Amino acid sequence: LLKDIIRLPRPDVRGVTFPTYTFPSGHTSGAVGVWGYIALTMDKKIVWVLSIVVVVLVGISRVLLGYHYPGDVIGGLVTGALFLIIFIGILKFAAKYITKMKFGYLCQIFFALAIAFLLSLLPATYAPNLMGYLAGATVGKIMEKEWLNFRVPKEWRYHFGRSVIGLLGIILLIPGFNYMVIHSYGFLTFIQHCLATFWVLLLAPALYCKIGLAAITKD
């Protein structure tokens, strides 16, 4: 929505073309939303450091590639933070009442998906991407806590194995999906990005536990 209102042209870089306007940076706002949510929910120092590093690198890469001005990246940081605050605020407000309901666990999942999907319908270019990420991350975290609450060994070989498997899943679901299924921004984009963070927060940890790269601590 802001891109179409402000209508700032992309940087004039030879060999770089992009069909949309430049402000704000959608990739940066997406990075803030996803990694900010993961950092807030996991609340561990190493996760905060990793999240900040990823967001900074995404912002710098958009400028170096010639897709954005530095101001676009700052705008992306602000809009991503606003999306995250709205989403978490609504989720916490709803959770106060949902957890007291019968089948509260299932209701949390339903409302998380419903809220994220409704926000994905906002007239913003990357709303389906960002809200898909947040929906998958929220549902994945709820289910992981309920089913697994997994513990990871500290040895580097386990970290390496988990990293390789996790990245392969992301590659399959994001660039791989784009090659296999032709689609524009909308429902399929929401589902695609929802599955990506659902993989990170639940499916990949479940696989790690299955093959001995992590352990289930949930009784």
Image: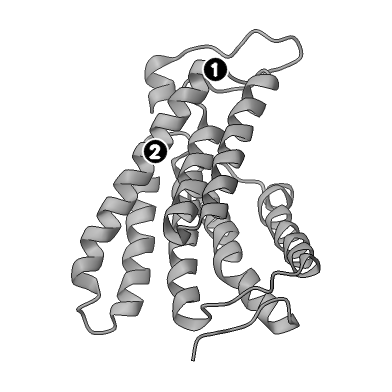
Numbered-mark total: 2
Q: Secondary structure at mark 1?
A: helix
Pick whichever, 168 or 49, lies toward us.
Answer: 49
Q: Few, some or many C-alpha atoms within 10 Å of disc 1 (few <14, some 14-19, many ≥20)?
A: some
Q: Looking at the picture, which amino acid does disc 1 mark?
A: Pro
**Horizontal side of residue 77 vs 16, given as left or right:** left
Q: Which mark is residue 70?
A: 1
The residue at the far right in this view is 157
Residue 151, by quadrant, is bottom right
Q: Residue at x 28, y 79 (%)?
A: 104
* Residue on which the image places disc 2: 81
Q: Residue at x 76, y 14 (%)?
A: 15
Q: Which mark is residue 213?
A: none
Residue 173 visible in the displayed image: yes
For the residues labelled 1 and 2, the Cα–Cα distance comes to 17 Å
Pick whichever, 98 or 208, lies toward us.
Answer: 208
Q: Secondary structure at mark 2?
A: helix
Counting from the top left corner in percent of width and height, residue 155 is at 75, 69
Residue 5, by quadrant, is top left
Pick whichever, 155 or 62, lies toward us.
Answer: 155
Q: Earlier in the sequence, mark 1 or mark 2?
A: 1
Counting from the top left corner in percent of width and height, residue 175 is at 71, 47
Q: Looking at the picture, which amino acid does disc 2 mark?
A: Ala
Q: Residue at x 58, y 14 (%)?
A: 10
Q: Residue at x 31, y 65 (%)?
A: 111
Pick whichever, 63 or 18, lies toward us.
Answer: 63
Residue 186 visible in the displayed image: no
Q: Few, some or many C-alpha atoms within 10 Å of disc 2 (few <14, some 14-19, many ≥20)?
A: many
